[in-house]
Image (cartoon, rainbow, N blue to C red):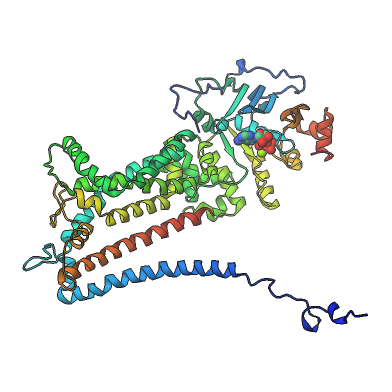
Amino acid sequence: MSDPTRRAAGPAVVPPRLDTVPQADSQRVSPVEGETVFDLRDVDVHYGSFRAVKDVGFTVVKNEITALIGPSGCGKSTLLRSLNRMNDLIPGARVGGLVSYHGKNIYDADVDPVEVRRRIGMVFQKPNPFPKSIFDNVAFGPKVHGASRTERESIVEDSLKKAALWEEVKDDLRKSALTLSGGQQQRLCIARTIAMQPDVVLMDEPCSALDPIATARIEELMVDLAKQFTIVIVTHNMQQAARVSDRTAFFSTEVNETSDIRTGVLVEFDDTQRIFSNPSDERTENYVTGRFG
Amino acid sequence: MTTSPDLAAPPDSGGLPNLRPSSPRYGEKIIFGILAGSAVISVATTVAIVLSLIMPSLDFFRDVSIVEFLTGTEWSAGFQDAQYGVLALLSGTIQVVFYSLLVSIPVGLGVAIYLNEYAPDWVRRAVTPVLEILAGVPTVAIGLWALYALTPIVADLLPFLEWGTYSIGVAGLAVGLMSVPIVSSVSQDALRAVPDSLRQGAFALGSTKREVSIKIAVPAAFSGIVASIILAASRAVGETMIVLMAGGGRPQFTFDPTEPVLAMTSFIGQTATGDIAAGTTTYDTIFAVGLLLFTITLILNMLAIRMVRRFREVYE
Ligand SMILES: Nc1ncnc2c1ncn2[C@@H]1O[C@H](COP(=O)(O)OP(=O)(O)O)[C@@H](O)[C@H]1O
Ligand SMILES: [Mg+2]
């Protein structure tokens, strides 16, 4: 791992400046209203010499849920990780193109990935609570960033309430997080992420390890959290994308005929409703109707 | 027709299928014999060692009271009016353990955290065999090195203390350097067992590399790290050659690192290689000290095994 986690001096990520936000210009993309949080242009991600994703461009709007869907291996997780520089932790991974966050390219030389991840949190596919108490899990981020004991107590309560877990755990905050059920653990991981008071929450198939009841709770939670945060979610579950998201990016793989190398591409990006009712690309239609993938 | 109807009949009687072994399979029996024999040998050896320590020790404690042995601070075995206060020897052993851990914990843990959390692959691949070589250096060579090279260095570094030719502090330091690979390799195993998903989770909360290592990886590997330290302590308790060569031979109850002190192992090593008559109290003394040494290391090793088991349970 070669993560330059040293904190850069000065403000690493500039505050939102609406006047400098470039307008989405790809023909595939419908015009976007609302404040743009992410604007991706010609994003390529390589693992060593293997190009996993190419030429991706879409925008993420504030307080919306953006879903990334597509068959397995088309680069959804790869792309999601490039939004908060988690790819930096994978040796050999490189991100090209422009990943503009409130007008600032997060891959610029003066950007500190630690600062990026404080603002852009991530929830993983498999719940990964720390082997610590419930309280310490949620308090971890605030503590690392210098919150006092009393601040932490109120942040923990507030975050657990927002993650719809408070009622279930309020009497045993000192219990190990590992004793919780899978669905509770995932909500704890969400609470841990929002305790950082992030701007954006990235979620990589957050329900794929959960049963349908736990999944329904998390979906409800996402819709609720979008009032405060901006959410980008990867899901293999098309009903889930249709139920919760405002916009959907459909990815697929292109196979190079001579070398048989598969590269992920963005096929279509649009309002979720359009993607599921009236997609403009045949590949999208085949996928969402279940004829492919 | 000469064909007898017998030939068509199955070889065994009663028309049942023949399910007996097609060969006697001696190989299986031999392997089983060898393996069971090995198990018996190792258990028998342990029992024999314990018994051979206990028998003469019982003779010893007929001559010397166990209270005097465990609480006395004077040791003059083999002399007129001999005193058998094992605390004089234990103070040497405790100092060796203390000074060695002072070195092996920070260095060993530093190596483990660096190699597992920070170092690129090629550094890890280059350093690991070096540690294995260090672990394999004969202790007599380390003892020589401690006596002739390390003592002058320590005397230069800490000139305000009076260092003689032999000192328990230098012996402890050398034992500590020798134990670095024990701490680093067991701790590294423990750190490696911490799932990467935990580190990812911490990075995703905006933690730095240092915060991920110290606040997530090390606590998650804690019982394994403690086990590595207990193993190093147990190794230091039992270390003989380095302590005998560099630690000096004066049995005295002291906690001054510059003093020569006879540790329990040095006493056994020194006395057993001299000429002593079987059946004398001096002869029995060696076994009593050996039994105490065995008990201490047994307890430490059992603690270490329990800790290692605990960190395995958490993630499997
Ligand atoms: N750490 C990695 N190192 C090398 N290749 C990877 C790595 N992670 C993913 N890939 C490759 O990148 C492509 C996209 O993977 P991924 O982003 O996980 O797809 P998805 O999430 O859509 O299933 C796949 O071909 C996968 O094998
Ligand atoms: Mg994925």
In the rendered view, tell whether residue A118 sits above or below residue B196.
above
Query: On the rendering, which quadrant does ligand 1 occupy?
Result: top right
Residue A177 spot, x, y in % from top left = 52, 52
Residue placed most toward the observer, A226 or B71: B71
Tell me where residue B251 sits by quadrant: bottom left
Res. B247 in view: yes
Report the side of B221 relative to A258 (left or right). Answer: left
Q: Is residue A230 visible?
A: no
- Looking at the image, is B276 positioned above or below residue A276? below
Toward the left, the furthest residue is B80
Q: Quadrant of residue A57?
A: top right
Tell whether A250 sits left or right of B280. right
Report x, y in % for residue B202. Answer: 50, 39
Residue at the far front in the pictured view: B2
Residue A280, relative to residue B103: is it above or below? above
Q: Nearer the viewer, residue A160 or B232?
A: B232
Give x and y (percent) for residue A189: 56, 44
User: Could you tell me which residue is drawn at 32 percent across and 56 percent down?
Assistant: B234
What residue lies at 53% left-to-right and 42% top-to-bottom? B196
Q: How many marks?
A: 0
Q: Point out the residue furthest to the top here.
A: A19
Residue B242, image x, y percentages: 24, 50
* The C terminus of chain A sits in image quarter: top right
Q: Quadrant location of residue A233?
A: top right
Q: Is residue A217 left or right of residue A91?
A: right
Q: What residue do we see at 27% from left, 70% from top?
A: B53
Q: Residue furthest bottom?
A: B14
